Each structure stands twice: as structure tokens, then as C-alpha cells.
Image (tube, grey):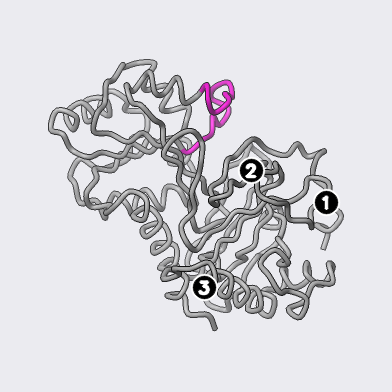
Amino acid sequence: MIDTNAIFTIQTEQEFCNLALDIFKYQFANNKVYRSFCDLLYKHPGDIKTIEDIPFLPIQFFKTHLVLSSQNPVQTTFSSSGTTGSITSKHLVTDLTVYRASFTKGFEAFYGAIKDYVILALLPSYLEREGSSLVFMANDMIMQSKHPESGFYLNNLSELKNTLLLLESEGKKTLLIGVSFALLDLIDTYPFNLKHTIIMETGGMKGRRKELIREELHNQLKEGFGVETIHSEYGMTELLSQAYSKGNGVYNCPKWMRVLTRDTEDALSIQNVGKTGGINVIDLANINSCSFIATQDLGRVNNNGSFEVIGRFDHSDIRGCNLMVL
């Protein structure tokens, strides 16, 4: 059994690699879905010497299989958003303390103590359904904040405007985390000039507005909120960790998370830094499901380990999909 405390005390590259290899062996032995996938690839612990050798499970498996490495009872199931009738991803979580430790320590590594911020969450599309891991995280951060002004906002944009202006007048450090379309709705109605507030978008128009490229979205948000930079959070239902960008769309991972890119023509080949490819994520906090996920995002990893998200795979672009029929 892996000591989960070791995940959040990683300090060096070698510690990360050693623990990732240990978790691969653990999940190979305990996760039936992942073991079957590795068997199809003829990849077994004896073949895996570096983290680049580890097989990455296509994220679509979370839509069709129960991806579990633990025998403990499931405490909650996080689910992705989807259109009516579509199949959604389901992430079965057997230990919520690991998720809480991951998003708390991850946020604080980049921004400092949560208790120092008023947390305002503008997440209407997520609040309107069950099972959002983002809502769970935001709710927990609101409770950790302990500021009476912290809270969720649905369609009450006038109240949110008044709260933001009050906090601004009082000089309180504030984090407004919101889905893209709702942040645009807010600035369409009320102009701001904020000096003490971090604006963090979580992506997604959810069919409410025309999709925008990141630069266009951020320019509109910067102008509307009167801020110099727009921050972003990179996370998903199938992960228990988040990467953060403090501007310009460049994300950094906490020490227990890593992004690699795979060749778009050969899903099993990891690319050198600087080349655009499919984003593979190592999330060691996913100890009880699968820590090695091949996403449908396209991106590029920089020399310092930061990464950029460039777009998404078209279904016609995904290679190696025959491996997904287990």
C-alpha cells in the first residue's frame, strides 16, 4: 500500500519519479481496467524503467468503465458535464481526504493560504447539476476561507457586483473563480476596475456563448474587470489535482502532478519538450483510481515543466482508439 502522505511531501524530481513508478506497480496490481489496458500493450512492471515508459489510460475509459485501484467503499462519484443523452465520465473517489489535501496544498503552493482570501464562486452551469468536482473544491475553499462574504453565485449578478465593489473598497484579497460565459455575462452588465481581486476562469462556454480562443477571452475579461492578467485553472473530473496559470495561458503543476505530450500519430510515444502533442497527465493524487491519464487536449510542455493548452483533439484525430474496446 502507498502512503498517501508521501504524495504531498515530494520535493525532488527523483522523489516524484520513484513514487510514480511505485504507484504504477500498485495500480497495475490493483486496477483491473488499467491492468487489462497494460496487458493489451504488453507493458508490465518489468518493462517500465522511467515515467515515460508508463502506459497512459485514455480518458474515455472513465465513461465506460469503473476505474478503481482501491477496495475501500466509494465515498462520492464525480461526474462530468454533458449534453442530454451523452455519456458522462464518472470518477469514483474512495478517499476524499486525498482530494482535499490535493486542491488545498496545490492552491496554497501558488497563491498562499486560502484563509487569506474571500472566495467568490460564479459557477452556474456546475451548480445546476450533481457531482461536480469543481463545486466540491470551491465549496470546501469557501468554508476554509471563513470570510462571511465568501460564497456561491448563480444568476444573482447584481449581488455579486455589489459584493465585489464592497470588497474592493475595503481592500480585501479576493478570488473570483468562474466559468467563462458567466464571467462575460457579469462584465457585459457591470464594468469594474479591480485592484485587489484575482479573476480565475475555469474555461467553458457550455453552449451559452460562442467559443473564443484564449487570447480573445482573456482580453475581454481583462478589459471588463480592469485587471492586468487573467488566471486560469486546469483540472477535470478524471483528475484530483489542478494546474494553475497566473496569466498568458502558461500553467504550472504542483509537485505531485506532471504533464507530458504524446505524438499525435503514435499515442504510445512521448515527445520531447517544446513539441505540440496530446496532453498526458501524471496525477499522483489519483492513487485510488488511475494516476496516468491520456487526455483529449492538445498542448506543449516548456523546458521548465510548465505547459500550454492549445486545443482539443477532433475525434477523427485520435489515434490508437482500437485499444479502447476492452
- According to the picture, the residue beneath numbered tag 2 turns out to be 300
The quadrant in which residue 187 appears is top left
Instruction: Using the image, determine if residue 219 lies above or below residue 197.
Output: above
* Residue type at tag 1: Asp
Percent from the top left, x then y, of residue 207?
Answer: 58, 27
**Secondary structure found at label 2:** strand
- Lateral position of residue 264 relative to residue 145, left or right: right
Which badge, 3 or 1, is on the more N-terminal residue? 3
Which badge, 2 or 1, is on the more N-terminal residue? 1
* Residue type at tag 3: Glu
Give residue 266's mark: 1
**Secondary structure found at label 1:** loop
- Lateral position of residue 303 relative to residue 296, left or right: left
Percent from the top left, x then y, of residue 140?
Answer: 33, 54
Which badge, 2 or 3, is on the more N-terminal residue? 3
Q: Residue at the spot x=83%, y=48% of the render?
A: 319
Q: Which portion, as a residue range, is magenta?
A: 202-216
Residue 31 lies in the magenta stretch? no
The label nearer to you, 3 versus 1, is 3
* Residue type at tag 2: Arg
Badge 2 crowding class, 10 Å Cα cut-off, few under 14, some 14 to 19, many 20 or more, is: many
Q: CA distance from mark 3 to mark 1?
A: 29 Å
- According to the picture, the residue beneath numbered tag 3 turns out to be 15
Q: CA distance from mark 2 to mark 3?
A: 24 Å
